[in-house]
Image: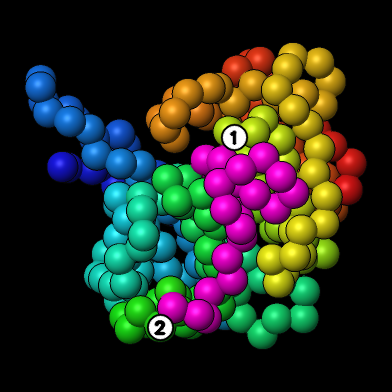
Amino acid sequence: MIYGVGFEVVNRQTRAWVEDPVFWPGEEGADWTSLALLKTGSTEKLLLATDGQPHSIDLEGRETSTPPLLESSVSEMRVWTPPGAAAPWAGVCLALTNQVLFVENDVFFKIEPKWLEGTAVRLGSSLGQGPGELAFPLSFDAGPDGRIFVLDAGNGRIQVFDGEAHYITQWGHPGSGAGEFNFGRGGSPEDFAGSVAVDSEGHIYVADVGNRRIQKFAP
């Protein structure tokens, strides 16, 4: 499956994107593709995931490392620096396995799979509707205080965890009113759509796709 990857720098502003693959008639589609830009000091890398395979690429287009194959396709990838951390962290949403994984980036970029065996922090105790359980998590982001906000698409809510994967709180349920969400419905990740992002002041923005709106919440 061919993916179109674009990268450009204009007036010192960096932009990167992945174009949807071209599907031939009768051919099954590939899983999602996601990317994130990692900055560590003066070093910049593009972290790219095609299906369940992450790649680390420098700005010259050279692959610097190939992390281990993930347990499923990646619905979203994020890079952030937790409060007091010496280095950025990288994380991925694995909607098919109802998990969010994240780990310090210098471990993520290593080829050996040890971070999958115990180093990685895992959100999502199991598939379900209870506190800390997830159903098709499509998106997540980290706030400036280190809290992790997960878009729990299958349950129509946002769940909040601390940096060690401990459940804190949640809000929202399926609907169209204020604070309610419509991320879709069905039995696979492709039946859902949505995204969550947190700004530098801690405000939470949720792309409530089914209701054709973006909702903003206080820190």
Left/right of residue 47 with respect to residue 68 in the rendered view:
right
Quarter of the image for residue 147 reads: bottom right
How far across and down, in percent of the image, does residue 49 sit?
Answer: 35, 55
Quarter of the image for residue 142 reads: bottom right
Mark number displayed over residue 189 = none
Left/right of residue 203 with respect to residue 155 in the rendered view:
right
Point out the image quarter for the N terminus: top left
How far across and down, in percent of the image, does residue 42 sit?
Answer: 52, 79
N-terminal-most mark, 2 or 1: 2
Q: Which residue is mark 2?
A: 114
Q: Is 130 rendered above or below residue 104?
A: above
How crowded pointer 1 is (Cα within 10 Å; few <14, some 14-19, many 20+) is rated as many
Q: Residue 123 in magenta?
A: yes
Report the amino acid beneath label 1.
Answer: Ala
Q: Is residue 44 among what the camera can see?
A: yes
The secondary structure type at the circle numbered 1 is helix
The secondary structure type at the circle numbered 2 is helix
Report the amino acid beneath label 2.
Answer: Lys
Q: What range of the chain is rendered magenta?
A: 117-140
Q: Which residue is mark 1?
A: 153
Colour pattern:
rainbow
The reply to whether dot 2 and dot 1 touch (C-beta < 8 Å) is no
In this view of the protein, which residue sits in the foreground, 20 or 13? 20
